Each structure stands twice: as C-alpha cells, then as structure tokens.
Amino acid sequence: MSLDKETVARIARLARLKVPEEELEPLAGELSGILAWIEQLNEVDTANVAPMASVSDVTLPMREDKVTDGGIAEKVLANAPGGAVYIDPTDKNAGGFFTVPKVVE
Amino acid sequence: MAGLTDLTLAELSATMKKKEASAVEVVDAHLRKLDEHRALNAFITETPDKARAMAKASDERRARGEAGLLEGVPLAVKDLFCTEGVQTTAASHILEGFVPPYESTVTSNLWKAGAVMVGKTNLDEFAMGSSNMTSYFGGVENPWKRRGDNRKLVPGGSSGGSAAAVAAYMVPGSTGTDTGGSIRQPASFCGIVGLKPTYGRCSRWGVVAFASSLDQPGPFARTVEDSAILLQGMAGHDPKDSTSAPLPVPDFAAAARNPDIKGMKVGIPKEYRVDGTSPEIVALWDKGIEMMKVAGATIVEISLPHTRYALPAYYIVAPAECSSNLARYDGVRYGLRVPGKDLIEMYQNTRAAGFGKEVRRRVMIGTYVLSAGYYDAYYKKAQQVRALIARDFKDAFQKCDVLLTPTAPTAAFAAGEKMDDPVTMYLNDMFTIPASMAGLPGISVPVGLDKDGLPLGLQLIGRAFDEETMLKAAAALEQAAAFTGRAAGF
C-alpha cells in the first residue's frame, strides 16, 4: 500500500500532529516503505485463526465496585501545564480545574 | 583490593551485612563513578541527595535488624518508571519537567526491599528505538569501543542508559523495560545480563506506557544471580495492573545459584539461522550450544515456522498500541503545552513539538493501521499472526525446556550507523521480538567478544512463568562461558 500526500495529511489530522506541508511528501515515502515491508504478512494463511486477545492465559480479575481513592485534587493538578484553578484555595484537595484556551465563545 | 564499585550486587549485600561497609559508603563510592563517567550521558536525572538520604535510612533499618532483600544496594532506574517527586521524562520533550505525584509499583517494591536510587537513566524516547539515539536528551555512549577505533558506539536500546550504567560500574544493577528487546539487546551490546520476565510477572503500573500488551519491566546486572535477586525484588502481583499475574514470587536467586542442567532439553530453533546475522554471532551460538551440551544438556533442534513474521507483526501491534497510549499527551493535564489559535491547534502544535521523529512516525503508522477500513487488514491480521507465533512456541516447549538463540544480529554499532532507513534499525530486534510477541521470558547472557573486542550475548527463552528453568540454564551458560570482559577504562 502506497500512501499519497493527502492520506498522510489525513492521518496527521487524526493523530493530532501538525505536519508542515513540505514534510508530507517525504513522510509519505517513509511510511509507504514501512507499510510495504509489513505487508509480507499477507503470505501467512490466517484463515480460521482467532486473533490473540491476550498473551497470558490469566482471566482478568474483577473487584468490588467501590471508590478506592480520591480527595487528591492537588496531586492530580500538580503538573497542569496551564496552571490549575482551585475551588477553595485554602483546601486544594476540595477540587479544582485544568485550564485550557477558550473553547466556547 | 577491589573497590566497592567492582563488587557484584550479591557481594555488596554480603559486605554490608558483615558491616564492612555502610550503605552510605557504598552509595558514595557509586556516586563518584556517576561523576567520573558523566560523559556517557547514561542519566537524564541524577539524584545524589535522595540517594544519600535513602542510604542513611537504610543503615538505620539495618541497625534495627530490619534489612530487606536489597538493603543498601544502589540502583539506577530507567526514566520510564514514575518516581514520586523526581522528574520522569520517558526521554521526551513532551514530558520534560513532569514530576509524578506517585511511585510505580516496581520501584516502590525495590525501595521497600531497601534499595537506594541514584538516578533516572536515559532511553530512546518513549522506549521506541534500538540505539538510544532517539532520546530528546541526547544519545548514550556505550562504555565499550572497538579495538583501535575511537568512534563512539551505541549502547543499544531502548534501555541504553540503564545498560551503560551497569557496564560502566556506576551501579551493580538497574531497571529496564522490554517491549521488543529493549532489555536484552542493550545487555548484549554492553556485555552484561539483561532479563525480560514473563508478561505479567512485574507490574506495569506507573511505567509510562508504550505498547501495553508487550511492555514488561525487568532488571540489568553483571551476573545471572544478581539479575535473579533484582527480579525477586521487582516482581509480584499488583491489583493495580489488571494483567499482573496473581502468582507467588519464586526464589529466583536460588534457581540462579543452581546451574545443574543435566538432562535439561535445550531447543535450537532452526529458523533463527537467518541471512544478515554476523558470522561471528553464528559461531558464538554454536559455541554456546556446545557449552550447554558439555554441561549435560540434551540439544534438540526445533522449529518456529512463523519466526520471520514476528517483526512485521510487531510493527503493526506496537505502533497501534503506542498511538492509543500516546493520545494522552495533549498539553492539557501534564507535560508540554504549545499554544494554538484554538484547542485542536493547541493539541497539534503540542504533539508536533513534543514528540521526536521516530515517535511521530510510529504514532502515524499506528493511527493509520487502526483507522476505519484498515483495522482488519492490519491489526487483526497481526494479532492472528501473533497467535500463530505463540502456538509455535507452545509446540516447541513440548519438546524442550528452554531455547538458546543469539540475542542480536550484530555487536554494538557506531552512532549514526543504521540510521538511513527505519526498517534497518527495526531488524536489530529480530531475535528478541518473537518471545515478546508470545509474552515469554528471555535473558541475555554475555558469552564472548568479537574480533573487534566487543561483547556478544546469547539469549535463553523460557516457558511462561518458568523463569527458574531459564535462570538455571543461564547460570550454566554463564559458568561455561566465564565471560570476564570489561570495557577499557571502566
């Protein structure tokens, strides 16, 4: 499968990656090369083979549906890149917000 | 007399137990090595103050008679493990300055066992690479050099800093993570032991995720016994990781101290004799087979028919999972934020500036193979091939107890070599990826030097959750090989 510039632009948009116009063409070549190499998998007969769901035979465990943590808003917000806003600055674990650029006018 | 930094982890523990050195003295000796060899760029963050405080606390615990399995042992931690209060970057610009408010389960287990952290080691960005060249913080230099050639060599990757730190005697052991060979290949390149446990043996909680169905933490050390002791300290069931196996932790160190392999069946997969492998590595493999035979093992030729498809299948599965996992880096809750005219552009600018070239490439491949209309052709196909790979191993283990193969197709290469084409770099992991795809444990043991004086390792692969048999075989191989190589100047 050979990817064209438009497809690369579409993938970049889906992946939320800004790719400058002049990089689209070389990237298309690179990604096409990798995909062409991957396509040797088509040689393998996989009819009636169930896709692997997990490498371990372990059954996923269940736990009781109850709250096991919480009340740590300050920790959750500690790395906020735009800074955090707290509901009650004197009790940061009471809750707060991440800040983002204005979305709704 | 050998200095404290020359001792193995087991020897260091014995020395501290006999009160011949305190944990504070031990950590100071190792911190001096970090100073001495800073040019290797093995660490992204050094934590000398924390190390001294932890060592002091360790001495106090020992005085109270509360010494743990790794009491006072200085360790380096791959900068992919979240460490509370200490910057954790995954070697990416997008996480530069990120200070986790929590501790990963594996490192938390190590500190509970008494170990002391000296710093966070360099790696390929988000563990994506086989050379350590994709780190935002610069490549790591392998302590080893080709004889008569001053060019810098790569330590392998992705856990290159952790491997280099152990090979340079800065620490007796370190942690790594292995997704497709990221512990075993750098161990081979640096002449040390690297162990990737069975998927599910060590908790992934608090480890920055790359490809969740493959990622597995594991140790580096200079001896098989040391790697077993470290694994014992790292492993264990963790309810916070749903794929963590609810199994007791066996006495791995005891297995490693028992190299009796009489009657053990060692399988040699014929499909691993592939073009492109250095003739010296093929010769070393044959020598390893002979060593196992002399030690009393029975050699069995086995077949893993789908071996050559493991690598292309991996390069669907791993990028697909990485594209999902890395979706979280959006500049909203942590890490880098680059402004844009609206929210979408903020995401796009942040991710374009924050991720390096190889990470962007894999995110795009992953996004493509998971996109509408292509899922069946790529991801489903890869998971079907993966099921066949796992079945191959299952069949092979009907006939043998452990497999012996090369670890990597070449010795360490120079920085800048193999960089022209991503696929050439991917081929480095051709011998390690099949076991990763099947979730099996593997260990790389240094066995010899090539004609340029560079170390080469061989890999042993075990049954799922049977690291003990693998460790016994590794100890026998280590004993027979009697590898004593040490990088010049270290």
Image (tube, rainbow, N blue to C red):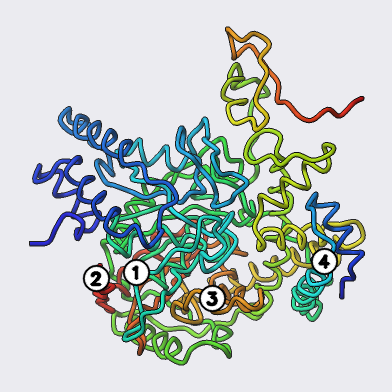
Is residue B487 rendered to the left or right of residue B469? Answer: left
Q: Which of marks 2 and 1 precedes in the sequence?
A: 1
Q: Nearer the viewer, residue A19 or B231?
A: A19
Q: Name the residue under label 1.
A: B143
> What residue type is disc 4 on?
Glu
> What residue type is disc 3 on?
Gly
Q: How far apart are marks 4 and 3 (CA)?
A: 24 Å
Q: Which of B153 and B79 is in front in this view?
A: B153
**Residue A22 circle label:** 4
The kind of secondary structure element at disc 4 is helix
Is residue B325 rendered to the left or right of residue B202? Answer: right
**Residue B359 place in picture, x, y as percent:** 66, 58
> What residue type is disc 1 on?
Pro
Tag 2: Cα neighbours inside 10 Å, few (<14), some, or many (≥20)? Answer: few
Q: Distance between the residues labelled 1 and 2?
A: 8 Å
Q: Which of marks 2 and 3 precedes in the sequence?
A: 3
Look at the image and tell me whether residue B479 can be seen. Answer: no
Is residue B208 rendered to the left or right of residue B193? Answer: right
